[in-house]
Image (spheres, helix red, strand yellow):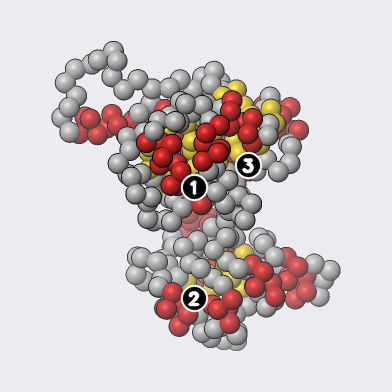
Amino acid sequence: MDRPRILLTRRIPEEGTARLFAEAEVDLWHDGSPMPRSALLDRVQGVDALLCLISDRVDAEVMDRAPTLKAIGNYAVGYDNIDVKAATERGIPVFNTPGVLTDATADMAFALLMALSRRIVEGDRLVREGRFKAWDPTMLLGKDLAGSTMGVVGAGKIGSAILHRAKAFDMDLVYHSRHRDQSLERELGARYLSLDDLLRCSDVVSLNVPLTNETRHLIGARELSLMKGDALLINTSRGPVVDEKELVKALSDRRIGGAGLDVYEREPLLEPGLAELENVVLAPHLGSATVRTRARMAKMVSDDILDHLSGKAPKNCVNPSVLGHILGGSG
């Protein structure tokens, strides 16, 4: 039996792709930068599966270039880069990597928060530049977390993990989500609030929502105006959840205390003026960037693609009705 042909748009951890290379003919884009659109359209032709990254736009045009395409695997939890509706219409299942990066991303949110609240990046720069001359009781004073209010927007797996971490820091907990989670409220004492009320009362606002039409620019000029003057905004979800232009204005005018960002609206480009601000900590999309997590992501998406192509049931499918149709089930 011929081995399936799979296009892999970027090198991912080898610890998770051993089975992929053993069981399939893999066309790997070796360049360290994102695969150009023209190369994707050319090399997707004739493949059985596409294993892509969040930086790859996979739309109807890409799918129509590959009439033999039987599966799309996304090396990410989010899948806003893929036209799932177009895939479903063509009977193509889309796989992702949910759950595996919960702890890593929650840790990253807290790393940004700690760096921002205690002004670690500013201090690092001061020391490296030789400007640290003596201990000063007024130098780089930061923000206490104990006793302050953590507001989580989107209390899914990652948002819930952030609330658990905030509880350990003795923070008061509030959250806003599509649905109330009464078990979370009982376990942690978290309070459910409307988005506006959460923004008004929180000392820290952590964004943990998927990117959808409803969440694009969820945080804009009006929402930023509701936040406390010393509040901190943490975004480890998707860049376009925040109107970056309005965020730069709010940070520049000191209408909020600061921001810790791991994602950007036009990633990797930054809104002009953002990089020059002292009250912001910027990271290059490191939410899932641990050795173990990235390897597990690679194995998860590889296994789902190969299982599906061999007639086995995959574990993580964002459009399972397609699987039901293919397997002759009820969906």
Sequence-first tag of 1 and 2: 2
Residue 218 in the figure: left or right of residue 112: right
Crowding at dot 2, Cα within 10 Å, few <14 / some 14-19 / many 20+, comes out as many
What residue sits 55% from the left and 48% below the top? 217
- Looking at the picture, how far across and down is residue 317, in whole percent? 67, 63
Sequence-first tag of 3 and 1: 3
In the image shown, does 248 or 111 lie closer to the viewer? 248
Residue type highlighted by circle 1: Asp
What residue sits 44% from the left and 74% below the top? 37
Residue at the spot of label 3:
154
In the image shown, does 45 or 299 lie closer to the viewer? 45
What residue sits 39% from the left and 33% below the top? 253
- Looking at the picture, how far across and down is residue 237, in whole percent? 53, 47
Crowding at dot 3, Cα within 10 Å, few <14 / some 14-19 / many 20+, comes out as many
Residue type highlighted by circle 3: Gly
Residue 302 in the figure: left or right of residue 112: right
Crowding at dot 1, Cα within 10 Å, few <14 / some 14-19 / many 20+, comes out as some
Residue at the spot of label 2:
7
Residue at the spot of label 1:
243
Q: Secondary structure at mark 2?
A: strand
